[in-house]
Amino acid sequence: MTTLDTASPPDPEVLNAFEREGFVILRDVISPEWREQAASAATRLLADDRTRGRDRSADGKDGFRGIVAMDDTFLPLVTNPKVLPTLVALLSPNLHLMSSNLIYMPSIPRGATRTIRVPERHGWHRDMSPATRDLGTHTVGRLSIKAAYFLSDLTPDAGVTMILPGSHTETGPVTVPAGAIDPPGAITPDIGPCDVLLFENRTWHAGGLNTCGHPRLAVMMQYGYRWLAPVDDPAPQLLGREDLTDIERQLLGQPDRHPDGSIAHEGAGGAPLRTWWQHLNPTPARSPR
Ligand SMILES: O=C(O)CCC(=O)C(=O)O
């Protein structure tokens, strides 16, 4: 089993593909056993009537933000050793987890009335739109990357997240032709059940259309620089646990502090991943464009 100590440095081809296309698929990054457990954990959470962190929206969509603090099954995703090297190479070691988001998307019968993924509300967007509003499309850089895992069956009509390849370097809005719901060139990534789809904040994307007859379950783990605000609710009970590693603690939001709680210099909290990275890969993480 791969651990952070035995992880491989990122594949340069993968990094180049991400730079070029704004997304990439990493193969076989979770086990079928874990995937099954995670699907059960997700189903349990969704069956609960808890409202904290709940994210219900149009056409029966449901889900939660902050699932790593709701069920330990999801904790191993935070430091997935088959994914973390690529994330660090594309951003830097100064990362934290901004969100762990479970998304339940019901299947909509073909031809049934729906209010999203229709021409008036096609759903194509970039993430972190406030950053783009504040800084402008010409200035906003790669700030975060989502790692999207899919826990339900993956047929072509399952509603996997769609991507517009290369759109991360476009500065204009995407154009969806009148009457259509997708821009020209949009694709449904060819993702397998144990793979992960990585895409960045500037990459235009949309939830696909699920008409496969069963709900689509996805988990989106969003990693960004430690100086960006988390999206999920704070989970102090998680950070207070004794069984976490320093890298888990960093990713789960440990601030710049010494062990006695006093203030350490800015960026000090990025040391666990920085040290790990130096051992894994002597070349510096690339600066995002
Ligand atoms: O549910 C999906 O496939 C898309 C989710 C999405 O657009 C997002 O997380 O920003």
Image (cartoon, grey):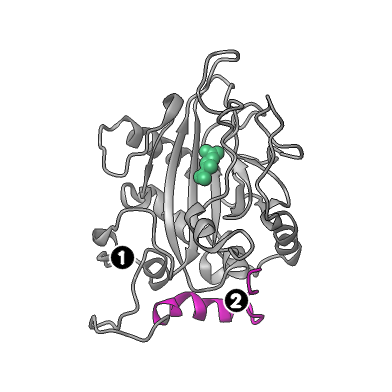
Who's the residue at 72% across and 31% down the image?
177
- Magenta stretch in the rendered image: 268-289
Q: Which mark is residue 65?
A: none
Residue at screen point 61% across, 27% down? 119
Q: Is residue 264 left or right of residue 223?
A: left
The answer to whether any part of residue 111 appears in the image is: yes
Q: Where, by quadrant of the figure, is residue 92 drawn?
A: bottom right
- Name which quarter of the figure residue 284 lies in: bottom right
**Distance of mark 2 from mark 1, alpha carbons?**
23 Å
Can residue 150 be seen in this snapshot?
Answer: no
Residue 38 percent across, percent down from the top left:
44, 42
Q: Would residue 242 be counted in the magenta stretch? A: no
How many circles with numbers are drawn on the protein? 2
Residue bearing mark 1: 243
**In the image, is residue 253 above or below residue 279?**
above
Q: Farthest residue toward the bottom?
A: 265
Q: Earlier in the sequence, mark 2 or mark 1?
A: 1
Who is closer to the viewer here, 117 or 271? 117
Q: Residue 41, percent across and down?
A: 38, 39
> How many other residues sit within 10 Å of disc 1, few (<14), some (14-19) or many (≥20)?
few
Q: Secondary structure at mark 2?
A: helix
Q: Amino acid at mark 1?
A: Asp
Say what secondary structure mark 1 lies in: loop
- Residue 115 image point, x, y percent: 50, 23
User: Ligand 1 closer than 8 Å to the CB at disc 1?
Assistant: no
The kind of residue tagged 2 is Leu
The x, y position of residue 180, in whole percent, is 68, 27
Please give the residue where the numbered disc 2 appears in the rendered image: 280
Q: Nearer the viewer, residue 231 or 125?
A: 125
